[in-house]
Image: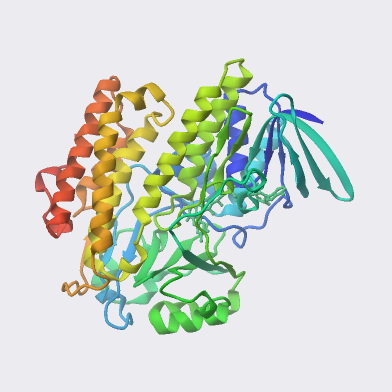
């Protein structure tokens, strides 16, 4: 057996990379080796169901999966956060941050089993060879020739050779372990999660008409975060009719031993999130699974090589699920990997390109690690977190999404041109991250029952989302927009340093609707 590209692991990263490669270069032979069985079960399958703008754009537009997503998955009503108030027994008294209507550029809630099954079927129809129920055992990298991989299928051990080898095997981290590329990080967080076979609706937490009418569509469609010091609890709806629920926390502030079973998690929730616990109790007989990661974040020394190997998805870097950036990182990485492989198969020398893409990808991940540094202890502080969430939204929409949507993250000439802007931006990120690290864990601001409506109060955020669809005449025009957005961040940072309540008072001039 021989193939141009061998992808180890047919999960979200591997399956979408295969589709992207095939779209770019239909004649390339592509093989996937996947340990699991297809079709995968729906709902209680993998974690990582919520997408944000980059990941959603990648799946919907670049991979042309919008029809499937719109007919078989759920639209996402943005990210929604509830901050602690008293004993957390009345949701209407908790500070809420979230949109009241759907944004222009969409994002989605993806049932992972259903989504991977669809990708699998499309890939098979496109002639991509997929060996499921097959486990890769040995990888031999041969920079001067074709790499060789041994995998077990039933009772047989088979061998396949390839020009390019991509590790998309998630937490098996095959190449990272083999090449000793593991890199630790400062984040020490843990997560437990489970799926309930029911449409759990957080709107049921109150029958207060004012609270219920504050948002147009049901809050159920948001990725709902119930926040407290050192932790957050998620509720994510799935199109298969189930609900994903997860608790994520700072290992230094909460003990994983107190939540490492469903029953223990429920006891914990009754103490910290009594209203949510009562809601979940109604579905106790419909628990579909329960899983736990004790220390989920890690980095990687290198992800792409001129020796024709790459690492993509969770096999390389995983940072944090708060803000749901997992699929974004699959999108960034698969773009780099696709470009490297396509150029090499067309006969170009990709030595320098592989090194440069490696630097850009690891830099991107460094920036996102910075966003999470020292953050979890502040999750109970509604005032500080309002500033932090609005800041991070402008960083994400105004810079990262702007560059991604206009295909500039792998345009090295463009990146070199905006080097001074990026340096200014990095300094800003560093100083604001340091400021947030110094903030107290608790607040005494009177936030009883307040609502920061991301669709109305935070209009400049909504505008940045809408503007992602804007076309720019040339690179100059795009750079001008980037400068404007960095300028906006500079103003925002001053308000943050001065402890101004930016949700209500920041820059009325910027809250006008875009043309
Ligand atoms: C608590 C938590 C919450 C998260 N929430 C979100 C979220 O809301 N949104 C989001 O975008 N991301 C989220 N993520 C991240 C998301 O889970 C990952 O980005 C995504 O699952 C990674 O996909 P992948 O294809 O790299 O890995 P996987 O989906 O794990 O796929 C790897 C595949 O490789 C196969 N495999 C492994 N070893 C072998 C082998 N030896 N031989 C053959 N095949 C093999 C496995 O069977 C598997 O199918 C979350 C992560 C965590 C930990």
Q: Quadrant of residue 343?
A: top right
Residue 98 placement (x, y as % from top left) = 30, 59
Q: Quadrant of the N terminus?
A: top right
Q: Quadrant of the C terminus?
A: top left
Vertical comparison of 412 with 270: above or below: above
Front residue of 438/318: it is 438
Q: State which quadrant residue 21 falls in.
A: top right
Colouring used for the render = rainbow
Task: Please report the residue visible at 56 percent of the width from the left and 29 percent of the height from the top.
Answer: 338
Q: Position of residue 265 (x, y in %)?
A: 51, 78
Classify residue 95 by image quadrant. bottom left
Whether residue 416 sits left or right of residue 490 in the image: it is right
Q: Position of residue 357 (x, y in %)?
A: 48, 31
**Count of labels shown?**
0
Q: Nearer the viewer, residue 71 or 396?
A: 396
Q: Is residue 78 visible?
A: no
Q: Is residue 281 above or below residue 466?
A: below
Along the horizontal axis of the image, is 366 left or right of 312? left
Q: Is residue 375 visible?
A: yes
Residue 209 on image: x %, y %: 26, 73
Residue lying furthest right: 155
Q: Is residue 8 left or right of residue 291?
A: right
Q: Residue furthest front?
A: 180
Q: Residue at x 31, y 26 (%)?
A: 471
Identify which residue is drawn at 34% across, 25% down. 416
Give 6 or 74, whichever is nearer the viewer.
Answer: 6
Looking at the picture, tell me which residue is in the foreground, 226 or 433: 433
Q: Which residue: 46% across, 38% down?
A: 361
Q: Examine the rendered structure and indicate whether residue 333 appears above or below residue 272.
A: above
């Amino acid at each position: 057996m021989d193939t141009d590209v061998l992808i180890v692991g047919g999960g979200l990263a591997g399956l979408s990379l295969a589709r992207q490669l095939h779209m770019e270069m239909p004649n390339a032979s592509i093989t996937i080796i996947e340990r699991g069985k297809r079709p995968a079960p729906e709902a209680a399958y993998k974690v990582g169901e919520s997408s944000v703008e980059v990941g959603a754009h990648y799946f919907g537009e670049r991979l042309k999966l919008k029809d499937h997503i719109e007919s078989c998955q759920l639209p996402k009503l943005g990210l929604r956060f509830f901050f602690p108030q008293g004993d957390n027994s009345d949701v209407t008294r908790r500070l809420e941050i979230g949109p009241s209507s759907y944004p222009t550029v969409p994002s989605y809630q993806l049932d992972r089993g259903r989504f991977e099954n669809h990708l699998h079927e499309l890939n098979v129809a496109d002639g991509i060879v997929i060996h499921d129920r097959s486990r890769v055992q040995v990888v031999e990298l041969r920079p001067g020739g074709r790499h060789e991989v041994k995998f077990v299928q039933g009772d047989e051990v088979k061998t396949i050779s390839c020009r390019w080898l991509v590790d998309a095997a998630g937490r098996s981290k095959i190449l990272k372990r083999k090449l000793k590329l593991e890199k630790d990080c400062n984040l020490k967080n843990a997560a437990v999660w489970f799926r309930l076979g029911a449409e759990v609706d957080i709107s049921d937490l109150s029958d207060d008409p004012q609270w219920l009418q504050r948002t147009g569509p049901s809050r159920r469609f948001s990725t709902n975060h119930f926040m407290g010091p050192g932790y957050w609890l998620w509720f994510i709806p799935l199109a298969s009719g189930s609900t994903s629920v997860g608790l994520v926390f700072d290992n230094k502030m909460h003990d994983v031993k107190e939540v490492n079973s469903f029953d223990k998690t429920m006891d914990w929730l009754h103490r910290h999130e009594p209203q949510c616990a009562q809601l979940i109790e109604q579905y106790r007989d419909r628990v579909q699974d329960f899983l736990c990661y004790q220390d989920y974040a890690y980095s990687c020394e290198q992800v792409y090589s001129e020796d024709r190997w790459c690492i993509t998805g969770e096999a390389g870097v995983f940072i944090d699920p708060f803000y749901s950036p997992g699929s974004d990182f699959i999108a960034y990485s698969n773009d780099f990997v696709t470009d490297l492989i396509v150029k090499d198969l067309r006969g170009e020398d990709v030595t320098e390109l592989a090194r440069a893409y490696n630097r850009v990808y690891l830099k991107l991940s460094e920036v996102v690690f910075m966003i999470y540094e020292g953050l979890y202890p502040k999750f109970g502080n509604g005032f500080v977190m309002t500033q932090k969430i609005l800041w991070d939204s402008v960083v994400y929409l105004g810079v990262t999404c702007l560059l991604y949507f206009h295909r500039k993250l792998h345009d090295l000439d463009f990146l070199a041109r905006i080097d001074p802007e990026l340096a200014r931006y990095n300094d800003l990120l560093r100083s604001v991250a340091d400021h947030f690290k110094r903030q107290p864990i608790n607040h005494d601001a009177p936030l009883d029952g307040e609502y920061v409506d991301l669709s109305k109060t935070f209009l400049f955020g909504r505008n940045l989302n809408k503007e992602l669809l804007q076309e720019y005449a040339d690179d100059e025009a795009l750079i001008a927009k980037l400068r404007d957005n960095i300028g906006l961040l500079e103003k925002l940072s001053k308000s943050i340093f001065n402890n101004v309540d930016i949700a209500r008072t920041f820059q009325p001039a910027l809250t006008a609707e875009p043309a």
